[in-house]
Structure formats: structure tokens, C-alpha cells
Amino acid sequence: MTELQNYITSYFGITNQNMDKITSLFSETTLKKGEFFIKSGMYCEKLSFVRSGYIRVFANANGKEVTQWISTKGYFITDLYSFTFKQRAKWNIQALTDCELYTIDKENYTLLNNLVPNWVEMEKQFIAGCFIQLEDRVFNHLSLSAEERYDKLFENNKELFNQVPLQYIASMLGMTPETFSRIRNKKIS
């Protein structure tokens, strides 16, 4: 069973009968390090599950790059606003390492509604889960100190700290690279 099938089974409770229908709509794709999944201003017509690698979601704001998220193995990636509402993408999504993905295009994604009973309800639960995760990130940004945010991310994603440029992690945590370095040096010593 592939990582995608494991995720679908554990998260959505899809039966084997429907699993083949769903996974047949995905194709295995790759992104080379530095390659863009989507650039802001374009239309995002695909959704991918990260099988391996690291992908950064970022935007340019006031002349600097702001990292919104770094996606790792086991997460989906898309510009949800563009994919869902057929609007231009707000985010740049770029591979930080070579990546292997399972990708479904918009046309095949719309077929899920016809192929899988209760798809609308399952999709709603998935999006609610994403929203809850976003709420938790906002709450942490508002209520935790920079050091507590660092600790929480490190506790849950240690491998990220060895695989991704640290300025991207600092940006994602809402701190300057200098603050990030100061906290990191304190933890190391």
C-alpha cells in the first residue's frame, strides 16, 4: 500500500473498493530542487500529496519573502484559494529538495464526487481539519513566545531543522533569522 493509500485509509476511512477508484486518478510526479509547483499569479490546477521531500509555500510582502508553510512527507500541497475558486494563486510553492508527489488535476478531482459515496462530507471533514490546524498555528503565533514556537516546531518536526534553510523556518515561525539563531544557539549550548 502506498503512502497515499495509507493516508486516505487512516484519514477518510475509504474502503478498498473505492481506494482503487481514487488512487487511479492520481499520477506519480516529481519536482526537482528549486522547481516551482505553482507561482503566484498563475492558476493552480492540481493538488499533490507529498511522498518525499520538502516544499516551501511563500509570498513576497513589502520586498521580502514570507514563508507560510513548509510541507513535508505526508501532507497535501496546493494553493487552495486558486484550486477551489479558480482564482490566481496567492502563493509561490517551490521544492526545497527533490520531491516525489502523487498528483491529481482539477478535472480528475471533480470526478471524486461521482466516484466516491459521501465524498462531499469527507471533503468537508478534511477542510475542517485543515482549518483547525490553521487555527492552532494562529493561536500559537498569538499566545506563545518565539522560544515556545521554536520548541513546539522542533518537537514535532526535528528533521526540518537539518533539511531546510533556517531562514525559512524562522520566517514560518514569525521571527527574524537573528532571533531564530539566538534561540537555536541557546538550545545547543
Image: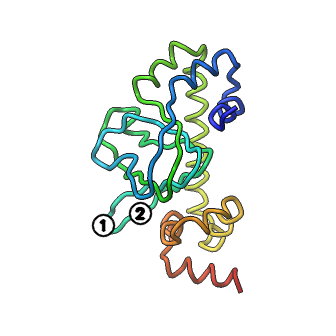
Seen at 63% across and 84% down, the residue is 185
**Quarter placement of the C terminus:** bottom right
Q: Where is residue 37 in the image (x, y as percent from the top left)?
A: 40, 46
**Quarter placement of the N terminus:** top right
Q: Which amino acid does label 1 sit on?
A: Asn
Q: Mark 2 packing: few (<14 Cα in 10 Å), some, or many (20+)?
A: many
Seen at 61% across and 52% down, the residue is 136
Seen at 60% across and 16% down, the residue is 118
Seen at 37% across and 65% down, the residue is 65
* Label 1 secondary element: loop
Quadrant of res 50: top right
Q: Disc 1 vs disc 2: which is toward the camera?
A: 2
**Label number found at residue 62:** 1
Q: Position of residue 70 (x, y in %)?
A: 52, 56
Q: Is 10 in front, or is 60?
A: 10
Q: Where is residue 153 in the image (x, y as percent from the top left)?
A: 64, 63
Q: What residue type is labelled 2?
A: Val
Colour convention of the picture: rainbow
Question: Where is mark 2, residue-wise?
Answer: 66
**63, above or below 177, in the image:** above
Q: Mark 1 packing: few (<14 Cα in 10 Å), some, or many (20+)?
A: few
- Is 105 left, or right, of 6 in this rendering? left
Q: Where is residue 83 in the image (x, y as percent from the top left)?
A: 39, 35
- Distance of label 1 from label 2 (alpha carbons): 10 Å
- Is 177 left, or right, of 37 in this rendering? right
* Total number of numbered discs in the rendering: 2
